[in-house]
Amino acid sequence: MPSATTPSPTPPTTSVLPPLAARQVVAAKLTALTAHPQMQPRRRHRTLFHILDFAMRTDYVLSELDNIEAGPPLQHPA
């Protein structure tokens, strides 16, 4: 077991994230859902509000996955 002063071994190079193509398909479906005219009524039903909120949060998480994959390796504080 590594101690706090010993550097940890290099992280694996394989990604555990879904493939980019799969993330793009989900993002396209979320965009289609949020752009649909019936999702933009003046008085949105509560259920539609929660569906729209879920879609927008999922889109945000997908953008963060892209940032994580493209960014520097994760470093835990010492």
Image (cartoon, helix red, strand yellow):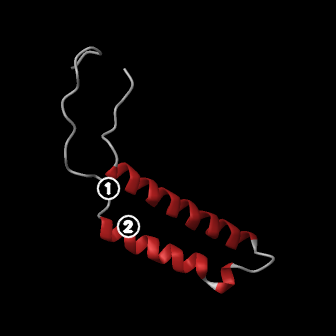
x then y, percent, for residue 55: 56, 67
Q: Left of 73 or right of it: where is 28?
A: right
Q: Which residue is drawn at 66% across and 85% down?
A: 37
- In the displayed structure, 43 sits above or below 5; it is below
Q: Left of 47 or right of it: where is 11?
A: left
- Please tell me which of labels 2 and 1 falls first in the chain: 1
Look at mark 2 in the image and give the residue it sits on: 23
Helix, strand or loop under label 2: helix
Q: How crowded is mark 2: few (under 14 residues within 10 Å), some or many (20 or more)?
A: some
Q: How crowded is mark 1: few (under 14 residues within 10 Å), some or many (20 or more)?
A: few
In the image as oriented, which residue stretches furthest toward the right?
A: 43
- Name which quarter of the figure residue 10 lies in: top left
What is the spatial separation of the Cα atoms under label 2 and label 1, in whole angstroms? 9 Å
Q: Residue at x 32, y 55 (%)?
A: 17
Helix, strand or loop under label 1: loop
Contact, CB < 8 Å: mark 2 with mark 1?
yes
Can you tell which mark lies on residue 31?
none
Q: In which quarter of the image is the N terminus?
A: top left
Q: Which residue is drawn at 20% across and 50% down?
A: 14
Look at mark 1 in the image and give the residue it sits on: 17
x then y, percent, for residue 4: 30, 16
x then y, percent, for residue 36: 61, 83
- Name which quarter of the figure residue 53 lies in: bottom right
- Name which quarter of the figure residue 2 lies in: top left
Q: What residue type is labelled 1?
A: Leu
Total numbered labels placed on residues in the image: 2
Q: Residue at x 51, y 73 (%)?
A: 30
x then y, percent, for residue 48: 68, 73
Q: Which amino acid does label 2 sit on?
A: Arg
Q: In which quarter of the image is the C terminus?
A: top left
